[in-house]
Image (cartoon, helix red, strand yellow):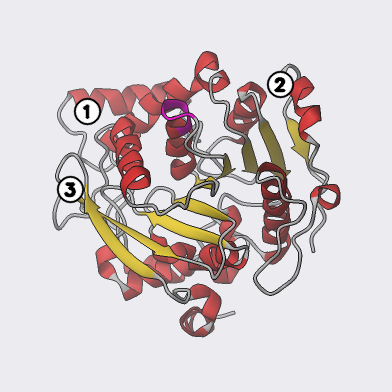
Amino acid sequence: MDYSEITHRLKTEKRFRPPPGWRWGSFVNADGARLRYGWALPESTIGVAVLLPGFCEFGEKYFEAIHDLLSRNLAVWQLDWRGQGGSERYFPGSQRPYAAGYERDVADLHRFVENFVACPPETPLILFGHSMGAHIGLRYLHDHPGTFRCAVLAAPMLELRTRPLPGWLAAGIARAAVLAGIGDRYVPGWGDWDPKTAEQPKGMSSDPLRDSVQGFWLLEHPELRLGGTTYRWLDEAFRSIALLKAEDYLRSIRTPVLMGSPKIEILVEPEAQLRAALLLPDCTLIEFPDSRHELWMERDEHRRRWLQAIDAFLAQQIRLPQIRLADGRQAPGQADSGLPDASHLESARNSEPVRDTSVPAR
């Protein structure tokens, strides 16, 4: 598939375009920065999804996933983090990413959830996060227990892959750069986003079409562009990861979690996801041995398996015998997916997480 065909498909296929009724909004956070969000509502709602993208990502990239969630009668509210997407940047007119502390992102998410996300009474609120968004989501679950009924985390950023450097050395270099006053500089090898890379494989997905979604939107909307890693972003990521590594921290998160763990990784360490799943009191771990980092952008066989696991997990957590899709089909039930009944989770907390490597594709 050449890039002209990829571009044509991304422009014309409905799954990659804004869903019906999609709207953009914005709010001002506690620091005075304006953050962008988007939302769409299904005809009938069984739950409200709060969708949190990863590093350098934005709402447009997730239109296909949003279509999927809407078809499951989930209202969708998506937030662009401060400094990326359509939200206000730390350095106006610059592509350099920055981080002022992940606790600020948690505070922004709390303001968003409490003041802007419309969740009818008795309707379950469900957190969906990818990579960095899943990381921030876990911190939110710790700081604000009881807000979300459950959480669905894809490839959570629980440890960065820094090879060939050991993680402790990479963290030390980032800390030293920040202390030396050069935290806003790019890490060697990184810089502003280059439009020439739009046609090149990213290695985030084995699906050539979906692997091109982010670059396509960056070409269409230059204001969404963001460069590579800076020392300050890296330093804050390492500091927050150290917090999430604390056993007591993870064990205090009581919210039920479904975690998808791809094994072909270049950004994060799957072993850290397994460790977290062992420590979280109520976690179902689904491993994807042949999937790359972006589960939501993977080829159909992985994506279908991921969606099937989500369907079964939500049917269990929302306490519905079946989730009925918008087209009238019923989502696969618990027995189809192999996910355990809640009564089996207690023993897993003290031994190993519930792991499922045999969910069949539809």
For the residues marked 1 and 3, what is the alpha-carbon distance in whole angstroms?
23 Å
Q: Position of residue 264 (x, y in %)?
A: 64, 46
Q: Residues within 10 Å of mark 3 (few under 14, many from 20)?
A: some
Q: Which mark is residue 178?
A: 1
Check the image and report above or below for 311 versus 233. below
Q: Which mark is residue 33?
A: 3
Amino acid at dot 3:
Ala
Q: Can see residue 57?
A: no
Q: Which mark is residue 349?
A: 2
**Nearer-N-terminus badge (2/1):** 1
Of 215 and 316, nearer the camera is 316
Amino acid at dot 2:
Arg
Task: Magenta stretch: give its range.
Answer: 141-145
Q: Is residue 331 left or right of residue 129?
A: right
Q: Secondary structure at mark 3?
A: loop
Comparing labels 2 and 1, the label whose residue is closer to the camera: 2
Q: Residue reaching furthest top?
A: 248
> Is 268 included in the stretch rendered in magenta?
no
Amino acid at dot 1:
Val
Q: Residues within 10 Å of mark 1 (few under 14, many from 20)?
A: many
Q: Secondary structure at mark 1?
A: helix
For the residues marked 3 and 2, what is the alpha-carbon distance in whole angstroms?
41 Å
**Nearer-N-terminus badge (1/3):** 3
Check the image and report above or below for 221 versus 276. below
Of 137 and 11, nearer the camera is 137
